[in-house]
């Protein structure tokens, strides 16, 4: 595998955002053998990018493998970490996935569900571009922080 | 296996409660081959009973098998069904379990987490008696309904 990413520019400004930094932290946490030590951030986050053309190559029905499930966890763990950072309360991610790649991803703060996503076609998990992934994360984050603000009592339970 | 339960009396009054009826409904839902058709309710619920002596026979560390995980789901599904029945809002159970039998069981109503249990030693899941199991269910149910009452806005989201 080449160490240069063709899907994310090395100087993409999104790479400097809190979100990308948290994603990199989560990815490195999985990297027990230090394979990523010599990789650029762009290269480490490349597996999250799945262009329309790449998606077309993947069968519509398929079972997600462990690697893609780990990647999904990285994404929701990163969101949870950002929520926690912003609101100062512990955010706990939880994922439930069938072998066929259907399921549900939750993030709770106290007794409040701040993220609740139905998962499907997990074997084709990925985003069209780094900035599309960041948009998605921003959206989840803003809804979550709004909920915490509106229902602070439940989030504090 | 004998069709007479030695751990639950056939005329145990708990068998007539909403909880036991819901547990039986959930157990029968798993019984694709109709094996339970000739069984008494006491016999169907017997696998949930694990006396102290029985527990001692099970190694402290062990991996839960599919059957015990299914049983755990039956228990939390039954609680969710009772919550739903009482408060009239949809209650959704969710379970996350590692291969080693550690995890978390949640029930959500709207955006409110009404049951949140840390699971451990799932390979030794069971209750000392039917009435102990009912007590546990009643406790979870009462806490859950209290939460729904106190935070109705979040439960209604």
Image (cartoon, coloured by chain):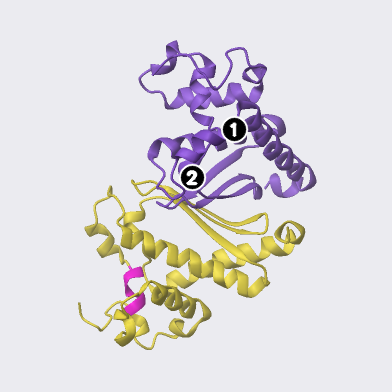
Chain colours: A purple, B yellow
Is residue A84 rendered to the left or right of residue A41?
right
Q: Chain of mark 1?
A: A
Q: Which residue is mark 2?
A: A122
From this viewpoint, is residue B112 visible? yes
Tell me if residue A144 comes above or below residue B4 in the rendering: above
- Which element type, helix, strand or loop, lies under badge 2? helix
Q: Earlier in the sequence, mark 2 or mark 1?
A: 2
From this viewpoint, is residue B9 visible? no
- Is most of the magenta stretch helix, strand or loop? helix
Q: Chain of mark 2?
A: A
Question: Which is nearer the eye, B12 or A131?
Answer: A131
Is residue A7 rendered to the left or right of residue B102?
right
Q: Residue B44 magenta-drawn?
A: yes
Q: Position of residue B117 (x, y in %)?
A: 51, 53
The label shown at residue A128 is 1
Judge the density around disc 1: few (<14), some (14-19), many (≥20) Cα neighbours within 10 Å.
Answer: some
Magenta part of the protein: which range?
A: B43-49
Question: Which is nearer the eye, B135 or A134?
Answer: A134
Do marks 2 and 1 both belong to one polypeptide chain? Answer: yes
The residue at 52%/80% (across/down) is B18
Q: Residue A149 magenta-drawn?
A: no
Tell me if residue A79 comes above or below residue B5 in the rendering: above
Q: Nearer the viewer, mark 2 or mark 1?
A: 1
Is residue A146 rendered to the left or right of residue A123?
right
The residue at 38%/71% (across/down) is B30
Using the rendered view, name the quadrant where residue A152 is placed.
top right
Labels 2 & 1 near each other (Cβ < 8 A) = no
Judge the density around disc 2: few (<14), some (14-19), many (≥20) Cα neighbours within 10 Å.
Answer: many
| Quarter of the figure that contains the C terminus of chain B | bottom right
Using the rendered view, name the quadrant where residue B8 is placed.
bottom left
| Quarter of the figure that contains the N terminus of chain B | bottom left
């Amino acid at each position: 595998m080449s160490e240069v990413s063709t899907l994310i520019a090395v100087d993409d400004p999104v790479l400097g955002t809190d979100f990308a930094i948290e994603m990199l932290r989560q990815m490195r946490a999985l990297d027990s053998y230090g394979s990523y030590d010599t990789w650029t951030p762009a290269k480490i986050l490349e597996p999250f990018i799945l262009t329309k053309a790449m998606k077309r190559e993947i069968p519509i029905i398929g079972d997600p493998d462990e690697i893609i499930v780990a990647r999904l966890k990285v994404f929701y763990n990163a969101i949870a970490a950002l929520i926690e950072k912003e609101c100062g309360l512990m955010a706990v991610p939880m994922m439930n996935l069938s072998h066929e790649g259907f399921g549900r991803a939750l993030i709770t703060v106290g007794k409040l569900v701040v993220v609740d996503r139905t998962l499907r076609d997990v074997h084709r998990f990925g985003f069209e571009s780094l900035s599309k992934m960041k948009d998605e994360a921003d959206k989840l984050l803003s809804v979550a922080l709004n909920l915490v603000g509106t229902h602070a009592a439940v989030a504090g339970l």
